Amino acid sequence: MLGDVLLITEKHELAAKDIFKRVMAEKKAMPAGQQHKYIVAISGESGSGKTELAHVLAKLLKAEGIRAKPLHIDNYYKIPPLERTKWRIEHGMESVGYSEYDWDTINRNIKEFKEGKKATMPCIDIVTDQVDTLITDFSVIDTLIIDGLYAIKTEPVDLKVFIELTYHETKKAQVKRGKEPQNEYRMNVLEREHVVVQSLKPSADLFVNMDYKVVKAK
């Protein structure tokens, strides 16, 4: 998202390096001539560091000559930022979750990446609260890094990463980033998101645990 604030720390750098090693190992293990466009998905609750991990991972891949593009699921909300709270209140807390996102456009953009096409993508400017349009040429992009609450729900994905920190542990980061006011209603939204996000945990390949160490799923 345009105008987003990244709070990259040593823990993000170290975790991204471990994920990078897994990505490179899987790429090298692919039979000659069968390499394909690779997709990493990173899920976790608000403030857990999804966007920071995606950014650092993309830079690590770039240093190896691999062009990687982060794709932020938060750009794909059906309801614009200024209208979202009103819409949620009108439709009830049960409306918070998968149904808020434009999965048709998400899946179309992933398909365009796999096929190496040019794609038109939404991009939220959090300074103006407007939804802009971004044009990306996927023909030169080797790896897509999808990050968002429900990123590992997307398919096809080669590597699914789940950050185990919950919104209880990330309140400080949420306040620093200041994207949404921290009030009782926001806390109810975070609790609802917590329930939905945690349901995705069993499908992960790697976990970033409470100490921000990367561990393999059992």
Image (cartoon, rainbow, N blue to C red):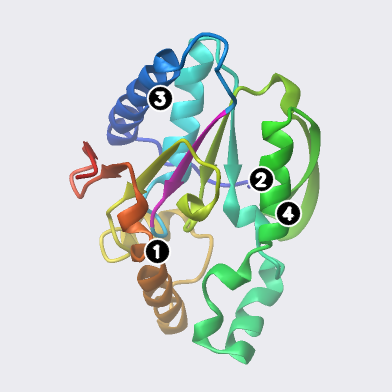
Residue in the image at 61% along x and 79% along y = 85
The tag on residue 177 is: none
Contact check, label 4 and label 1, Cβ < 8 Å: no
Give above or below for 97 relative to 157. Answer: below
Label 3 sits on what residue type?
A: Val
Distance, label 4 to label 1, CA atoms, is 21 Å
Q: Is residue 78 magenta?
A: no
Q: What residue would you read off at disc 2? A: 2
Give above or below for 108 relative to 138. Answer: below
Distance, label 2 to label 3, CA atoms, is 27 Å
**Badge 3 or badge 1: first in the primary sequence:** 3
Name which quarter of the figure residue 200 lies in: bottom left
- In the image, the segment drawn in magenta is 38-44
How dense is the environment of label 4, judged by Cα within 10 Å: few (below 14), some, or many (20 and up)? some
Q: Determine whether the residue tagged by mark 1 lies in a helix, strand or loop.
A: helix
**Badge 2 or badge 3: first in the primary sequence:** 2
Can residue 124 be seen here? The reply is: no
Q: What residue would you read off at disc 3? A: 23
Distance, label 4 to label 3, CA atoms, is 26 Å
Which marked residue is nearer to the observer: mark 1 or mark 2? 1
Distance, label 3 to label 1, CA atoms, is 23 Å
Label 2 sits on what residue type?
A: Leu
